[in-house]
Image (cartoon, rainbow, N blue to C red):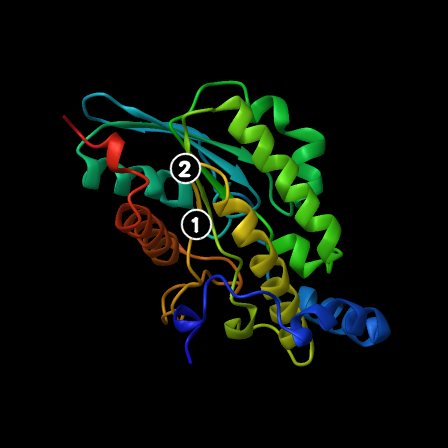
Amino acid sequence: MSTSELPHHASPTPWQRAAWPLAVGISPLLFAQGKWVRRQVPKLPPAPGPLEGHEPGARPLRILGVGDSTVVGVGVDDAQYGLIPQFARAVSEKLGRGAYWRSVGESGATSKDILARFVPAVLEQPADIVVVSLGANDAKDLKPLGATTERFERLLNIVHDGHRDAVVIVSSLPAFSLFPTLPQPLRSILYAHSQAIERSLRPMIESHPLAIMSPPPPKYHDTFFAQDGFHPGVDGYRDWAHFAVDDALERGVLNNLGAR
């Protein structure tokens, strides 16, 4: 079964819930594997270029991206090819409107980091669409499930209160089971823990008005990853952006934003 065929709204399985305590029990092995991965994988910087821009067109939408390395374009050589500008491009094409976009966050950020340092920037300007790409580092750093879920709920409430009429699109967590750079058992434990987080977050997120969590991604294709085998490259971000926009269109949350 591919990740795209997994039940989107299922509760965490016993194995997924057990991943974090198991990780604590074998932490010396996982720590050693993590050090090995960091030595093997090149550390890529955020994409050069501004963290805001626009797509030409009438009645421009205001798009805010919030999150981690994926929001600041790690994996591409030009910020214009990162997730948020490519999302803005896809929205502009499919809704027939212009778009202003800006990105708030930093590489390596967890939900705790965003709450601690970036809330003023999140609320600085109004937004029509808020894209949240966050949680990969909570899973990768094996943050406890309960605390992570609580922090996401706080962040979602802040976004909803500050951008009352905005559509909120939260990305699903990475399918760590398909990451070529991760050895076993680290790969399986990270994937199980990330799925425990995602399955706990999804019903909470989608209980909010105009908020959705994207489905699990399809299998990553050969040109999805950047040279580190961990972050998306140009093709990966483009396909991710279209995947998120298409899902939001299919589920009707963007219906009121189309050109008139």
Q: Kindly indicate the quadrant of the structure image that contains residue 92.
A: top left
Q: Kindly indicate the quadrant of the structure image that contains residue 223.
A: bottom left
Q: Residues within 10 Å of mark 1 (few under 14, many from 20)?
A: many
Q: Distance between the residues labelled 1 and 2?
A: 30 Å
Q: Nearer the viewer, mark 1 or mark 2?
A: 2
Q: Identify the residue shown where x is 25% and y is 37%.
A: 255
The image shows residue 205, relative to residue 260, as above or below, that is below
Between residues 88 and 38, which one lies in front from this camera angle? 88
Which residue carries the number 1 mark?
76
Could you say where residue 237 lies in the image, as x and y percent from the top left?
Answer: 38, 52
The mark tally for this picture is 2
Q: Identify the residue shown where x is 63% and y is 41%.
A: 153
Residue 78 appears in the figure = no
Could you say where residue 30 lies in the image, as x and y percent from the top left?
Answer: 77, 72
Side of 14 where 239 appears, left or right: left
The image shows residue 226, relative to residue 17, as above or below, that is above
Which residue carries the number 2 mark?
210
Q: What residue type is labelled 2?
A: Leu
* Local SS, label 1: loop
Between residues 135 and 164, which one lies in front from this camera angle? 164
Q: Kindly indicate the quadrant of the structure image that contains residue 222.
A: bottom left
If the image is split into quadrants, where does the C terminus sit?
A: top left
Q: Which amino acid does label 1 sit on?
A: Val
Q: Residues within 10 Å of mark 2 (few under 14, many from 20)?
A: some
The tag earlier along the polypeptide, 1 or 2, is 1
* Local SS, label 2: loop
If the image is split into quadrants, where does the N terminus sit?
A: bottom left
Q: Identify the residue shown where x is 20% and y is 41%.
A: 94
Residue with the most extreme front position: 207
